[in-house]
């Protein structure tokens, strides 16, 4: 990649003051403060904003031009770029907006240019699922991005998490802390079918316990789901079952 000096300066300095203000807010969050108390080697103090931003930008630069070009860009129709796997990306220029979406012109080393858009959802997916990506960013950048995505996410994300919490709510003696932890685990971990070894290990701890970890074997659950209990009460439905089993006021007359 070849860039002019003024473009590099703009890339390194643009938004630095805004990020410094945002990172100060991140560092003042109670959960972030507790992280720093546990590990003071983390750059989770407000004056670390410039170094954290520099690490974020260098990682983004590497992803765009070297490691994940094919993942971060698609055609305006959502299709894969043709030249991305054949040639090195050397230049990106903003093109125009179409339907509130910023278009870019990507120029490759073979001289061919393509129009593309940024796949934002794919970037978020890589951030949480690709070890090389979140290792490159580091804990501090990932924490800041977590806060940014959580603060600026659409309402559908909130409604989705609310629905997830609702599915874990049971009737009975269930603590709010238990409900919260179950919802967070379900939200953050992949589907059980993707990690059978983990499921087996958790199941063994649940059933047998572990003396070294001071975990007792779990008792049979005392929770129940009101909806499932009602669903198993009737064969067809409350009214239909009553009509089918009703013998009438004078059953002896019908014989």
Image: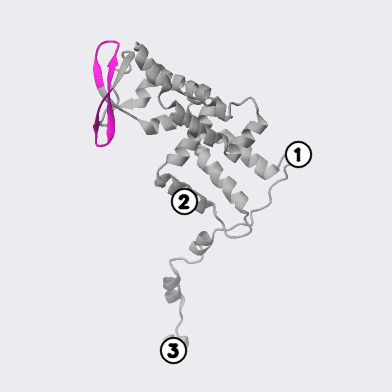
Please tell me whether mark 1 sits on a helix, a strand or a loop.
loop
Q: CA distance from mark 3 to mark 1?
A: 68 Å
Residue depicted at x 61% and y 60%: 172
Q: Please check the rendered image and state whether residue 18 is part of the magenta-colored stretch, yes or no.
A: no
Given this view, does label 3 or label 1 mark the residue nearer the observer? Answer: 1
Label 1 sits on residue: 211
- Front residue of 239/130: it is 130
- Identified at 55% across, 55% down, the residue is 169
Residue 217 position in % (x across, y down): 71, 46
Q: Give 124 or 56, whichever is nearer the viewer.
A: 56
Q: Tell me which numbered mark, 1 or 2, is placed earlier along the sequence.
A: 2
Q: Are marks 3 and 1 in contact (CB under 8 Å)?
A: no
In this rendering, does residue 226 appear at all? yes
Q: Dot 1: few (<14), some (14–19), or many (≥20) neighbours within 10 Å?
A: few
Q: Main secondary structure of the magenta part?
A: strand
Q: Say whether disc 3 or disc 1 marks the residue closer to the N-terminus.
A: 1
Marks 1/2: CA distance?
36 Å
Task: Give the residue pinned by disc 3.
Answer: 253
Disc 2 to disc 3, how far (Cα)? 54 Å
Name the spot of residue 52 as percent of width and height, x first. 52, 24
Label 2: few (<14), some (14–19) or many (≥20) C-alpha neighbours in 10 Å: few
**Does 53 sit above or below residue 172?**
above
Q: Residue furthest front?
A: 17
Q: Please report the residue visible at 64 percent of the width from the left and 36 percent of the height from the top.
A: 34
Give coordinates of residue 171: x percent, y percent: 58, 60
- Numbered range of the magenta stretch: 94-114
Where does label 2 land, which residue?
163
């Amino acid at each position: 990649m070849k860039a002019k000096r003024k473009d590099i300066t703009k890339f390194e300095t643009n938004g630095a003051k805004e990020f410094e203000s945002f990172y100060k807010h991140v560092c003042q969050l109670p959960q972030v403060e507790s992280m720093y108390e546990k590990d003071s080697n983390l750059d989770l103090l407000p004056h670390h904003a410039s170094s954290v931003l520099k690490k974020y930008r260098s990682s983004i630069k590497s992803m765009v031009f070297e490691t994940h070009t094919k993942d971060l860009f698609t055609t305006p129709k959502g299709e894969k770029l043709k030249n991305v796997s054949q040639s090195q990306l050397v230049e990106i220029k903003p093109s125009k907006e179409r339907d509130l979406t910023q278009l870019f012109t990507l120029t490759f080393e073979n001289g061919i240019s393509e129009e593309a858009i940024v796949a934002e959802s794919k970037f978020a997916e890589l951030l949480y699922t690709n070890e090389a990506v979140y290792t490159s960013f580091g804990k501090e950048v990932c924490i800041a991005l977590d806060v940014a995505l959580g603060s600026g996410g659409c309402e559908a994300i909130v409604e989705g998490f609310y629905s997830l919490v609702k599915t874990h709510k049971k009737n009975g003696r269930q603590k709010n802390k238990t409900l919260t932890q179950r919802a967070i685990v379900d939200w953050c971990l992949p589907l059980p079918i993707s990690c059978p070894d983990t499921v087996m290990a958790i199941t063994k701890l649940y059933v047998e316990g572990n003396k070294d970890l001071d975990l007792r074997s779990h008792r049979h659950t005392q929770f129940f789901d009101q909806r499932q209990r009602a669903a198993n009460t009737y064969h067809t439905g409350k009214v239909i079952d009553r009509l089918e089993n009703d013998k009438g006021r004078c059953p002896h007359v019908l014989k």
